[in-house]
Image (cartoon, rainbow, N blue to C red):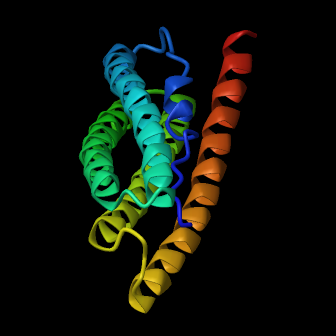
Amino acid sequence: MKRLSISALFITALLTVVLFSGCGKQTEEANRLVDEASAITSDTQQKVVQSEALILQAGDQQTQGQTEAQKATLNQIKTLNDEILAQIAEARAKTDQAAALNISDSYRRQLQASSTALGAAQDLFRTQQEMVVLLISDPVLEGQDSKRTYTKLQIRATDQRTLLEDAEAEAKRLVAENSSLSNK
């Protein structure tokens, strides 16, 4: 049986961004944009959890031979993933906007790392969306082309998940580094 899996890893880097104080410049505006991006990613995280639950449901339906129910569930997943992708893009745009302001270099590096993590999340969700669309068209992957394509998508998703984990680790490292600097 073929199952999709969505990583709930993504977006944590942005949620843990430390808001800077002072530093003059345009830091307050950057903090406002980061707050907005964090609110978006919080809502997105809830949708990721919903999507993961539906993926498990679709897998169970596939195992039980409930093809029509599986297709309906996959369409729900596709709709959720479209919303997730749009929200990631919006959060990333706000993060990039904040990074472009006149802020400290350390804050900018932190925001750029968060943007990189969000970009990696976008790539991963685009791949997972391709997997969903493929399963909608061939729910049990009967065709050789479908099987081959699905396997390639799984490999790409695994690679993208690694890139996402690395990007998030870097963003978290910068958050910790900046927190320790602001506590001195």
Quarter of the image holding residue 145?
A: bottom left
The residue positioned farthest toward the bottom in the image shown: 144
Check the image and report above or below for 37 versus 120.
above
Residue 86 higher or lower than 173, as above or below:
below
Q: Position of residue 80 (x, y in %)?
A: 29, 42
Residue at position x 74%, y 18% in the image: 180
Residue 167: tell me if it is visible: yes
102 or 183, nearer to the observer: 183
Please tell me whether residue 51 is drawn above or below residue 137 in the rendered image.
above
Image vertical order of residue 113 relative to residue 107, above or below? below
Image quarter in which the C terminus is found:
top right
Going by the image, does 182 lie left or right of 35?
A: right
Residue 31: % across, % down: 39, 17
Q: Nearer the viewer, residue 171 or 109?
A: 171
The N terminus - image quarter:
bottom right
Q: Which residue is depicted at the point 35% across and 54% down?
A: 70
Of the pair 108 and 113, the residue shown nearer to us: 113
Quarter of the view holding residue 159: bottom right
Residue depicted at 58% across the width and 40% down the height: 9
Rendered residue at 56%/33% (across/down): 13
Spot occupied by residue 93 in the image (x, y as percentages of width and height): 29, 40
- Residue 117, given in percent of the width and then of the height, sits at 51, 46
